[in-house]
C-alpha cells in the first residue's frame, strides 16, 4: 500500500500569507503544515509516499523535505498539478506511482490527533473498494456530508444547504487500484473541477464503500486564517500535554 499527499492549490483563502509560498509550507505551531500528514502516513505504516503539489513554489517542498529520509521514508516522490483541477484530478496524477497498488490519500492541510493505523489495517483486510473516515462536526454544511444507514454510506453530498447528518467526510481516503479508472470517467463540476465526492459516490453506487469514525480531534488547517490559528493552538496543547509542560 502506498501513500499520496495532495498539497496543490493556490491557498487563496489564506491570502496574503500565501502570496509567496504554498499554504502547506506555512507553520502549524512548531512545524510546517506538510510535516503532519507525512508523519500520520508514516506512523500508519506507509513508507512510500507521493507528494502532489502545484503553484509557483513547488520547488520549496523539495528543499524542505528532500528524499523523505528524515521521516523514515523508503522514498518520497513528487509530481506537479497544473492549475486547479480539483482533488480528484490531483489524485489521477498518481496512477503510475500507485502501479496497481492500493493507496491511502490525505489532504496536505488535514491534521489529526490520533493514529489512523487501525483504519488503514482494516482497509487492507477489505477485499475490494474504498474506505472513508468520518467525523461529527457542528457545521456540516461546510463539508462533504455522508448519509449513513446502519453500517452503509448511502450517499455523500458536497456542502449541502440542509445536511442529512453531521458526519463530515474528512480528507483521508483509501482506494483500490480501480480509483484511477473512476477518475478518468469523471466530468468537471459546475466549478470546473473533478470532485473527490464523485469518486466516493461511484464506490458507494457499487456497494464497495466502507467507513470508520475518526477518534480524537481533526483539523482542516488550510480552511482559513482562523482555522490555521486554532489548529496551531490545539497542536501546541497536545504537544505540551505529551511533554507535561504547563500551558
Image: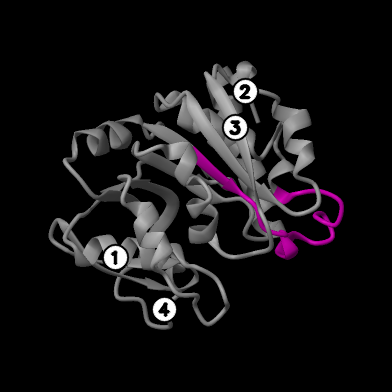
Write down the quadrant of residue 59 in the picture: top right
Q: Earlier along the polypeptide chain: callout 2 or callout 3? A: 2
Span shown in magenta: 4-23
Residue denoted by label 2: 68
Horizontal relation, residue 201 to residue 43: left or right: left
Mark 2 secondary-structure assignment: loop
Q: Is residue 153 above or below residue 95?
A: below
Residue denoted by label 1: 202
Q: Earlier along the polypeptide chain: callout 1 or callout 4? A: 4
Residue denoted by label 3: 77
Calculate the distance from the C-alpha at mark 2 to the C-alpha at mark 4.
38 Å
Q: Circle 1: is it few (<14), some (14-19), or many (20+) Cα within 10 Å?
A: some
Q: Earlier along the polypeptide chain: callout 1 or callout 3? A: 3
Residue 104 coordinates in the image, percent (x, y): 40, 40
Mark 1 secondary-structure assignment: helix
The colour scheme of the drawn protein is one colour
Q: Residue at x 25, y 39 (%)?
A: 123
Horizontal relation, residue 239 to residue 116: left or right: right
Amino acid at each position: 500500500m502506498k501513500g499520496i499527499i495532495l498539497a496543490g492549490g493556490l491557498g487563496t483563502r489564506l491570502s496574503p500569507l500565501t502570496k509567496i509560498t504554498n499554504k502547506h509550507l506555512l507553520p502549524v505551531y512548531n512545524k510546517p503544515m506538510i510535516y503532519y500528514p507525512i508523519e500520520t502516513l508514516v506512523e500508519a505504516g506507509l513508507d512510500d509516499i507521493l507528494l502532489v503539489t502545484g503553484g509557483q513554489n513547488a520547488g520549496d517542498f523539495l528543499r524542505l523535505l528532500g528524499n523523505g529520509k528524515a521521516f523514515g521514508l523508503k522514498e518520497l516522490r513528487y509530481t506537479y498539478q497544473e492549475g486547479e483541477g480539483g482533488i480528484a484530478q490531483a489524485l489521477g496524477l498518481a496512477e503510475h506511482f500507485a502501479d496497481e497498488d492500493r493507496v491511502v490519500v490525505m489532504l496536505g492541510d488535514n491534521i489529526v490527533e490520533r493514529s489512523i493505523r487501525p483504519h488503514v489495517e482494516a482497509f487492507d483486510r477489505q477485499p475490494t473498494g474504498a474506505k472513508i473516515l468520518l467525523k461529527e462536526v457542528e457545521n456540516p454544511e461546510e463539508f462533504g456530508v455522508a448519509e449513513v444507514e446502519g453500517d452503509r454510506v448511502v450517499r455523500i453530498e458536497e456542502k449541502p444547504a440542509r445536511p442529512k447528518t453531521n458526519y463530515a467526510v474528512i480528507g483521508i481516503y483509501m482506494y483500490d487500484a480501480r480509483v484511477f479508472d473512476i477518475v478518468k470517467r469523471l466530468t468537471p463540476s459546475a466549478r470546473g473541477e473533478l470532485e473527490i465526492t464523485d469518486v466516493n459516490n461511484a464506490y458507494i453506487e457499487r456497494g464497495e464503500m466502507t467507513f470508520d469514525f475518526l477518534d480524537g480531534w481533526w483539523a482542516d488547517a488550510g480552511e482559513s486564517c482562523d482555522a490555521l490559528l486554532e489548529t496551531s493552538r490545539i497542536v501546541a496543547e497536545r504537544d505540551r500535554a505529551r511533554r507535561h509542560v504547563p500551558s
